[in-house]
Image (cartoon, rainbow, N blue to C red):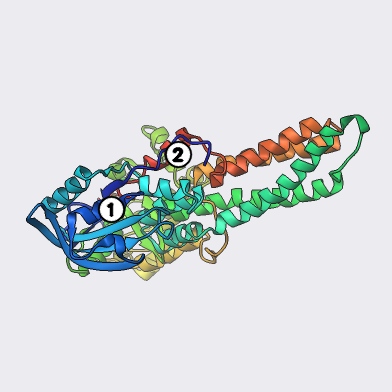
Amino acid sequence: MSNTGYITEDTIVALATSSGTNGAIAVIRVSGQNAIKITNEIFKGKNLLQQASHTIHFGTIRDGEEIIDEVLVSLFVAPNSYTRENSVEISTHNSKYIIERVVNLLIKKGARAARPGEFTLRAFLNGGMDLSQAEAVADLIASNSAASHQVAMQQMRGGFSNQLKSLREDLIHFASLIELELDFSEEDVEFANRDQLKNLINKIQVIVQKLVQSFEQGNVLKNGVPVVIAGKPNVGKSTLLNAFLNEERAIVSDIAGTTRDTIEDEINIHGVTFRFIDTAGIRETADVIEAKGVERTREKMKQARLIIYLFDPTQDKVEEVQAQLPEIERLQIPFVTIINKSDLLSEAQKEVYNVLNPLYISAKEQIGVEELKDELINRVQLGNLNTDDVMVTNIRHVEALQKTADSLDRVIYGIDNPVTSDFLAMDIRQALYHLGEITGSVSTDDLLDNIFSKFCIGK
Ligand code: GDP
């Protein structure tokens, strides 16, 4: 990429597996022109320089005569590697001491420590993937539900980029026709048929709008559905949250040796993550009717895409519940009306609350919690979600798409209110620029720094 100042001649090294786990194996990644040569200098077993790409070799890593570890070395010869450079993956035993020794040895022989995301940055700079695919690698690593995994996988495999690429090509064609007109400006010719251009732009606008609209759902799939559990003090909000979370923990701890490092206030329902907002302060998410704290509560609830509103029938009669509803409705966020503590109600008592069309649960006795989960899925309308659809999950992409749409609007305006070809060409170039920002065909060092610095080292 000519427009970046990155130098990729040097050879980089980093631990690619996560440090500090109890795993048996660690993988050290080396990439760059001299990756195989440098590794060969500390490896004893075979001459790695004479081995074919995509082969694995057993041997020892040595510092002089001292054996540091017995290892497996995987070879990838350029351009057939993730980074498109010569690459080596050394599988060592997962000891902090061994890893440090091996990495330091490689550095001593001429490699340097990789910066965050530098392997993926190189994959991008060397044309192995476009920018949106590189970003999807980070999403894939961060994915923690079936839905977020599927969306990231789809983007990484290029579903999203392919669609943009063909749009851009069509537009480039028109931009060059219009620019040709500029060369013949004296002769008042039109190479670019305006009706055809308008048709194309309308077609692109439909797709761009669809992608922009997919963001809401894509974002939810990637980051989880923000949910608030609300209701007066003592209605059972914490108990319900614990009922959700405990079940999760039980599932997770069934798998021997796993540690749970995900955030504690997320649950996974049918492959979709629900994220509870500010559950630490859940007790403060108190009565919306109370004058005090109403504003704060409302602000918190506004962040939600869904509200689980709990009522305690031992505290509130049906009329009192009804009196609270308009206040919740005013927020214009979907909410589920829950009558909690149903274990304390007789069937006859329950009937009184039926006018509210609520869900009856007992958070404490774990009754109705599964039905509530199904209801949550229904309410966010992800039930018939098709994750095969191309979906935008990245705020950077959606912003670029919106700017593309604005530029295209100006092109349409320019066609309808004849402006000179140079203005038309400029607006088309603008649209191309913003589309290019997504895939990285237009990029700056600042943008790349911003994206790749968020990666971990070794990715
Ligand atoms: P919060 O203030 O809304 O978070 O309410 P808590 O979750 O702390 O619950 C308040 C009290 O209600 C506690 O003593 C809970 O054990 C009790 N509680 C919560 N859910 C139920 C339920 O479904 N049935 C019964 N009988 N008690 C419950």
Q: Please tell me how crowded label 2 is: few (under 14), some (14-19), or many (20+) other residues with Cα within 10 Å.
A: some
Residue at the farthest right position: 187
Dot 1: what SS?
helix
In the rendered image, which quarter is residue 92 located in? Answer: bottom left
Residue 366 versus residue 303 in the image, above or below: below
Say which residue appears at 75% left-offset and 35% top-offset. Answer: 425
Q: Please tell me how crowded label 1 is: few (under 14), some (14-19), or many (20+) other residues with Cα within 10 Å.
A: some
Residue 184 versus residue 24 in the image, above or below: above
Say which residue appears at 77% left-offset and 45% top-offset. Answer: 174
Q: Nearer the viewer, residue 315 or 285?
A: 285
Image quarter for ligand 1: bottom left
Q: Nearer the viewer, residue 60 or 89?
A: 60
Q: Nearer the viewer, residue 456 or 49?
A: 49
Answer left or right for 177 relative to 62: right
Residue at the farthest left position: 66
Query: Does the numbered disc 1 mark a residue whose Cβ is under 8 Å from ligand 1?
Result: no
- In percent of width and height, residue 421 lies at 82, 33
In front of the other: label 1 or label 2? Answer: 1
Q: Which residue is mark 2?
A: 448
Say which residue appears at 35% left-offset and 63% top-offset. Answer: 361
- In percent of width and height, residue 328 lies at 48, 45
Say which residue appears at 31% left-offset and 65% top-offset. Answer: 51
Q: Which residue is mark 1?
A: 37
Residue 218 visible to the viewer: yes
Residue 395 versus residue 26 in the image, above or below: above
Residue 262 visible to the viewer: no
Q: Nearer the viewer, residue 89 or 59?
A: 59
Q: Amino acid at mark 2?
A: Leu
Dot 2: what SS?
helix
What's the CA distance linking mark 1 and mark 2?
29 Å
Q: Amino acid at mark 1?
A: Lys
Q: Earlier in the sequence, mark 1 or mark 2?
A: 1
